[in-house]
Image (cartoon, coloured by chain):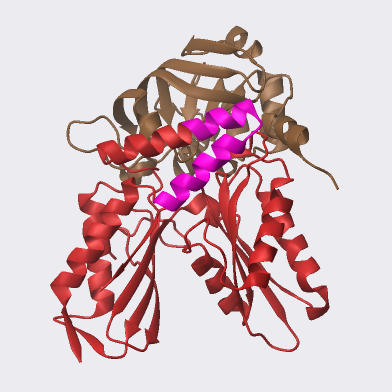
Chain colours: A brown, B red
Amino acid sequence: MAEYHMTTPLTDEDVSKLEAGDIVYLNGTIYTARDAAHKRLVDLIEKGEQLPFDLKGSVIYFVGPTPPKPGEPIGSAGPTTSYRMDSYSPILIEHGQKGMIGKGKRNEAVKEACKKHKAVYFGATGGAGALIAKAIKEAEVIAYPELGPEAIRKLKVEEFPVTVINDTHGNDLYEMGRAKYEVKD
Amino acid sequence: MREIAYDDLVKSVKAMVMHTASHLPEDALKAIEEAYENEKSEVARSVLKQILDNAHLASEEDRPLCQDTGLAVYFINVGEEVKVVGGSIRDAINQATEEAYKEGYLRASTCDCFDRHNLKDEVGYNLPAVIHFDIVPGDKIEIEYAAKGGGSENVSRATVLAPAQGKEGIKNFVKQVISDAGPNPCPPIIVGVGIGGTFEVAAKSSKHALFREAGTPNPDADLDAFEKELKEELNKLGIGAMGMGGTQTVLAVHIEKNPCHIASLPVSVNVQCHSSRHSHITL
């Protein structure tokens, strides 16, 4: 397993070298979105309208942070469960998204989109919201403030730690890891 | 009749709720430390290390352990010889919950079932609290509290087995639920199993089972043995911390059982993520 330090926006070349199990420290700008924001982004794509940020090379973090305390950029900010974004992610990937950060299993359509259009699904440690927030240096709501914790935020991150779950070659760390440690009677 | 002032009740519950959001209780911390010691997978060990680092950081800096600060769930035993003066117990619990979530910068997560609209402005910030009341002898009010996250709740399941399926059937059902859940509920997890009663009693018991201190034995020796057997079986699944593969998937299995109908064997599995934020006070 390799370790990489990468800066967004990510390129095809960046994501193609990643393999399930690799550790990546992300730097630069990433965007937050959960179910409600994903639905709106996909609606905009379908109507041919402009998105609130450039999808090309983008990384989207599935998170609904706690409110920030005064003087802090963000509250606790760990990943939410990703399957709720499964019906939207392939469309965003087709339009240039290169990375997703969340936790938990993705469906075949997402994995297929990762292979076909070169994108990766990263896992962050669920329930490590206080620790992960340390890697987030700035946060700004750029769309849908009425969604509260589900609004789209632009985050500036430094050495944001993630693990590659689904790579561009069709590998799945959840399946690989479990197969290695499963004890069959 | 002993009296407890409404404001005192609010104050005590509010302090407990705020503290619980950022301080992982000793039992959970100890169970995760043990998992870290026993884990064979290096990847899973690094995840467990992050979880422990997060717990220490959250406690030192008084930050929420997780961004999902949960729905506020209470089991409250009210003594028959105590009354709250100045307001109702339910109002006091809701007020304490709302103030703690607001002032503690915790996330309000309650929404309407269908339009998914967050109810913070109409019903109250992270209200209503989920409260299970019981009436018991004595002049005390015992309050058990947990901040229950959604990810682990989403993989929880209930069923009614045929009595002939017995313990083997229960074991298979629990295994299936945890296997299907895989990485989604943020393992290592605590598994609450409610057995018997009626359909809703089994579900409520599986929730209440999660409030027991992890690592403490079940007072019923047979159930204690069954808990240990289930834990061993579940750890064979190989799911590991955050599902990345490993030997430590389950921190503890807790079972509560109830007498049931001669025709039925209800079973419910309620899953708790590693961030097992729970607490209790007696007034």
* Residue B242 placement, left or right of A79: right
> Residue A87 in the image: x percent, y percent?
61, 40
Residue B231, image quadrant: bottom right
Magenta stretch? B26-49
Tell me if residue A77 can be seen.
no
Residue A54, relative to residue A149: is it above or below? above
In the image, taking residue A66 as reference, residue B260 lies left or right, namely right
Residue A63's spot in the image, x, y percent? 43, 37
Above or below B157: residue A63 = above
Residue furthest right in the image: A185
Question: Where in the figure is residue B108, as x and y percent of width and height?
Answer: 33, 53
Q: Of residues B25 and A23, which is closer to you in this image?
A: B25
Instruction: Return the x and y of residue B124 as percentages of the image width and height.
Output: 27, 62
**The N terminus of chain B: image quadrant:** bottom left
The number of callouts visible is 0
As for residue B95 lying within the magenta part, the answer is no
- Look at the magenta stretch and give its main secondary structure: helix
The residue that appears at 74% across and 89% down in the rendered structure is B262
- Report the front residue among B77 and B33: B33
**Residue at the image position 22 percent from the left and 38 percent from the top:** A69
